């Protein structure tokens, strides 16, 4: 099933790539965090170029896809197939997703307290709420929930699941929520999609109450697995990820928007030696054009992968490697919590 998925996705991505890869669909940009034009090439994958800012270390795509071309991707057959894994995946995918939602809600509740013990209701907004699974957990915990979701089908799912009308199919910049409205704003796997993150974060800061928290989950480009495999990683997907954050660059961006660092937690489900070797030997499902094979390296990695597949080695690898990465702040995914101080 997964092979069929990868083949269908790859065929559609190739067709789309061919259709949109023209200069009029690309925009040269400077660093989206500090505005500097001083940058170094970080890597090229599937003809998308990534740069590293020499001033603040932000990694971003330049030239990036224009808004029109990005919209063409989101409305494409390729994206529909891609979303099969993200939103309509196997039972284990959904279980795993719900587990992450549950942990994230626990982190939020520890910080803001239980809504049922407050004299006033606590308002929580999720930007990019998908089918509303996280919001359902938040609603069950007693939050007044609000959501924004641009995909019409997912928006409909979320409204049905939550039984509320406070889920809107508009961009956050277009919403007319009053300022200082929310106690919590939640973003999971969203910030890496945003072309102009500073204006986006300024808007979220304005929507937060003083003392409110912004919770952001995104991949950590300073993570151990990214240091090992670089742009081979699945997250380097030019059609929808123009920006790649580290704790340093995200902290800097939030600070510019009046949001103070409060806490950071790391998770590393994919950070194993096996995964790293695998990224070098096999293309992942977001890679359109496979890199040319070095036969000696290929053979070496085949041996390494066979060794890492031995059950006891695999068990130790999955037990120890992610924990070591998290311990030293090199986890694959970061959960960044910021507070609006004034
Ligand atoms: Zn910069």
Image: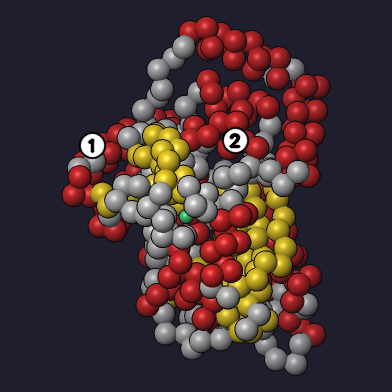
* Coloration mode: secondary structure
Of the residues under marks 2 and 1, which one precedes in the sequence? 1
Q: Residue at x 49, y 32 (%)?
A: 232
Give the x, y percent position of residue 153. Answer: 40, 62
On the rendered structure, is 36 left or right of 260? left
Give SS at disc 2. Answer: helix
Q: Which residue position holds label 1?
A: 18
**Is residue 291 placed above or below 256 in the rendered structure?**
above
Q: Residue at x 47, y 60 (%)?
A: 33
| Between 125 and 199, the one nearer to me in the picture | 199
Q: Residue at x 75, y 92 (%)?
A: 119
Q: Quadrant of residue 264?
A: bottom right
| Between 229 and 83, the one nearer to me in the picture | 229
Quadrant placement of the C terminus: bottom right
Q: Specify whether tag 2 is near ligand 1 (CB below 8 Å).
A: no
| Between 137 and 47, the one nearer to me in the picture | 47
Q: Specify whether tag 1 is near ligand 1 (CB below 8 Å).
A: no
**Would you say the residues marked 2 and 1 are in contact, meaning their CB atoms lie under 8 Å apart?**
no
Give the x, y percent position of residue 238. Answer: 38, 44
Give the x, y percent position of residue 127. Answer: 50, 68
Q: Which residue position holds label 2?
A: 227
Q: Is residue 169 visible?
A: no
Give SS at disc 1. Answer: helix
């Amino acid at each position: 099933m997964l092979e069929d998925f990868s083949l269908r996705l790859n065929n559609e991505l190739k067709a789309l790539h061919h259709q949109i890869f023209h200069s009029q669909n690309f925009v040269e940009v400077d660093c989206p965090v500090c505005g500097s034009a001083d940058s170094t090439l970080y890597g090229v994958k599937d003809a998308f170029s990534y740069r590293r800012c020499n001033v603040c270390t932000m990694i971003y795509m330049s030239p990036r896809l224009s808004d029109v071309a990005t919209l063409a991707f989101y409305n494409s057959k390729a994206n529909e197939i891609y979303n099969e894994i993200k939103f309509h995946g196997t039972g284990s995918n959904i279980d795993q997703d719900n587990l992450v939602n549950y942990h994230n809600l626990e982190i939020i509740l520890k910080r803001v307290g239980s809504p049922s013990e407050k004299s006033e209701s606590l308002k929580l907004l999720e930007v990019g709420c998908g089918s509303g699974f996280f919001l359902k957990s938040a609603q069950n915990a007693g939050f007044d929930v609000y959501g924004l979701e641009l995909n019409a089908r997912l928006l409909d799912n979320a409204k049905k699941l939550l039984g509320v009308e406070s889920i809107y199919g508009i961009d956050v910049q277009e919403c007319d929520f009053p300022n200082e409205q929310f106690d919590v704003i939640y973003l999971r796997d969203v910030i890496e999609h945003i072309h102009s993150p500073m204006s986006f974060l300024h808007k979220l800061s304005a929507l937060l109450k003083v003392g409110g928290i912004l919770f952001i989950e995104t991949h950590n480009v300073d993570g151990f697995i990214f240091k090992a495999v670089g742009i081979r990683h699945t997250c380097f997907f030019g059609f929808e990820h123009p920006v790649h954050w580290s704790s340093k660059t995200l902290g800097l961006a939030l600070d510019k928007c009046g949001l103070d660092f409060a806490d950071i937690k790391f998770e590393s489900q994919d950070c194993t030696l096996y995964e790293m070797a695998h990224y070098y030997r096999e293309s992942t499902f977001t890679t359109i054009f496979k890199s040319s094979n070095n036969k000696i390296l290929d053979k070496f990695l085949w041996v390494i992968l066979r060794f890492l597949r031995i059950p006891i080695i695999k068990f130790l690898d999955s037990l120890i490697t992610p924990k070591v990465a998290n311990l030293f702040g090199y986890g694959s995914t970061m959960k960044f919590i910021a507070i609006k101080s004034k």
